[in-house]
Image: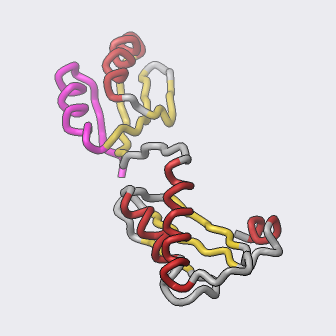
Amino acid sequence: MNQLRRSHFTAQHHCYAYVIGLKPQAFKAYDDGEPGHSAGDPILGQIRSMQLTDVMVVVVRYFGGTKLGVGGLVNAYKSAAAAALSQSELVDHYEKIQFNILYSYERTHLLLDLLRNFEPEILEKKFEQDCSMLIAIQKEWSDSFREKMQLNDFTISLVP
């Protein structure tokens, strides 16, 4: 916000809203001097209507000499937020669970073949006499992952 305010230092308002967390736990709407709930809330409404999280939208407004009224402000901020979000690249994030896998070096190829189906994030690998791999996978795939590892005699443990 500080960088944005420096970039647009002659603007009258820098209104924003954000939502943070996989289960939108933290959110804020800020009107920056506009009439109450005429800026931040419409921006927040656009974020929520798209069911987004871990996002912040800032609308910078310069006064153009025409008073919009509260209804006009609501519409302007809502439209600006909708336009910004529709032109943004959205990235899917999923809640992940970490597992530690223990295995012998000879089984590395089989393990990598099995992991491919779960799109793991490999966090750590140790190739020694006894190997281990710390991975993170999408939470919704954890039961299937455990089953697949157990069927193929891999030792796995959930990492808290």
Q: Is residue 29 visible?
A: no
Q: Of 62 and 111, which appears nearest the observer?
A: 62
Say which of 145 and 24 sits in front: 24
Q: Is residue 154 above or below residue 139?
A: above
Q: How many marks?
A: 0
- Residue 151 left/right relative to 81: left
Q: Residue 98's spot in the image, x, y percent?
A: 38, 43
Question: Residue 102 appears in which quarter of the rendering?
Answer: top left
Residue 16, compared with residue 155, is above or below; it is below
Q: How is the image coloured?
A: secondary structure
Residue 28, given in percent of the width and then of the height, sits at: 49, 76
Residue 129, quarter of the rendered image? top left
Q: Tell me where residue 68 appears, x and y as whole percent.
A: 59, 81
90 or 152, nearer to the observer: 90
Residue depicted at x 76% and y 74%: 11
Q: Is 116 on the left-hand or right-hand side of 128? A: left
- The residue sitting at 22% across, 33% down in the picture is 146
**Residue at image location 39% in from the left, 56% down from the top:** 50
Please give the range of residues in magenta: 139-160
- Asked whether residue 87 is in view, the answer is yes
Q: Looking at the picture, does residue 16 appear above or below residue 153?
A: below
Furthest toward the front, the residue is: 66
Q: Is residue 157 magenta?
A: yes
Nearer to the camera, 32 or 123: 32
Could you tell me which residue is drawn at 41 percent across and 69 percent down?
45
Q: Position of residue 125 (x, y in %)?
A: 50, 28
Image quadrant for the N terminus? Answer: bottom right
Residue 108 falls within the magenta-colored stretch: no
